[in-house]
Image (cartoon, rainbow, N blue to C red):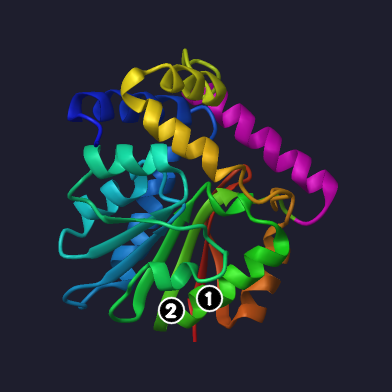
Amino acid sequence: MGVSMGTASRWVERWERQQQRYAVDREERFSVIADVTEHLCAGRGRPLLLDLGCGPGSLSARLARRLPEAEIVAVDQDPVLLELGRTHYADAARYVDAVIGAEGWTEALELDRPLDVAVSTTALHYLPAAVLLRTYQALAALLRPGGALVNGDHFPPDGGPCSDLTAQVGRRRAERTGTHGHQDEDWESWWRAAAADPELTDLFERRERCGPSSGGGNRHLSVGRHTRLLRRAGFRHVTPVWQVGDSCVLVALKG
């Protein structure tokens, strides 16, 4: 049984607010990802986009508004967030339940042509480095020549002292703009509150059965390390196109 629109809207709106705590200039990052995607899709009649780790569809919804002619496939493994997205942002994307990087995950997408652009925001850092490389390789195979991966996340620079500097710049930027620590709800309290909603009980039971995500993650991989992995995977050109502190949009172009 699906979630009602009222319930989905309430939890997605609360999700959007609490996420402001964690991504410096989150809306600007979304806009930059959309700017790059729009540029790469210029002149293409029905571009095909893939949103990796889509959560409740935040990025997909923004891309759908910017590129209404695009077909967007949004993939995630969390049944709670996927169902909220399917309901609240139903027209933005086709939502797919799959574990990014696992065996057969690309087949679950059921793509009928090469991708123009794959996008992600604050999602791929959950993948261990070896899984991340396999994911980059899979994406390079799915993308058309000239297509790209556009990934917004927190990427530390090479070198500890520089990493401290970028983190500090990001923190001070968030303090000045009032987007850090001023929301009533954080990640943990959002999940606790959502789990207490009777309408979401079945979804949380499914979430529990799915088990935890792959361990390890790659939060400490530098921009340089990501660049080397992307080039190994088949991306010819890799460059940051926007950065505030350690919040960055990294673009990898397939040759």
Q: Quadrant of the image for the N terminus? A: top left
Q: CA distance from mark 2 to mark 1?
A: 6 Å
Q: Indicate whether 36 appears above or below 2.
A: below
- Residue 21: image x %, image y %? 52, 27
State the SS at label 1: helix
Mark 2–mark 1 CB contact (< 8 Å):
yes
Q: Amino acid at mark 1?
A: Ala
Which one is nearer the viewer's eye here, 97 or 145?
A: 97
Left of 72 or right of it: where is 25? Answer: right
Q: Is residue 248 visible?
A: no
Identify the disc placed on residue 197.
Answer: none
- Specify the quadrant of the image occupied by residue 163: top right
Residue at the image point whose x is 25% and y is 72% from the top: 47
How many C-alpha atoms fall within 10 Å of the one at disc 2: few (<14), some, or many (≥20)?
some
Residue at the image point whose x is 19% and y is 73% from the top: 46
- Residue 103: image x %, image y %? 56, 69
In the image, is residue 163 part of the stretch drawn in magenta? Answer: yes
- Residue 126: image x %, image y %? 62, 49
Identify the disc placed on residue 138.
Answer: 1
Residue at the image point whose x is 22% and y is 51% from the top: 92
The residue wearing badge 2 is: 142
Q: Is residue 9 visible?
A: yes
In the image, is residue 108 part of the stretch drawn in magenta? Answer: no
Which one is nearer the viewer's eye here, 90 or 145?
A: 90
State the SS at label 2: helix
Task: Provide the residue span drawn in magenta.
Answer: 158-179
Prevailing secondary structure of the magenta residues: helix
Q: Amino acid at mark 2?
A: Leu
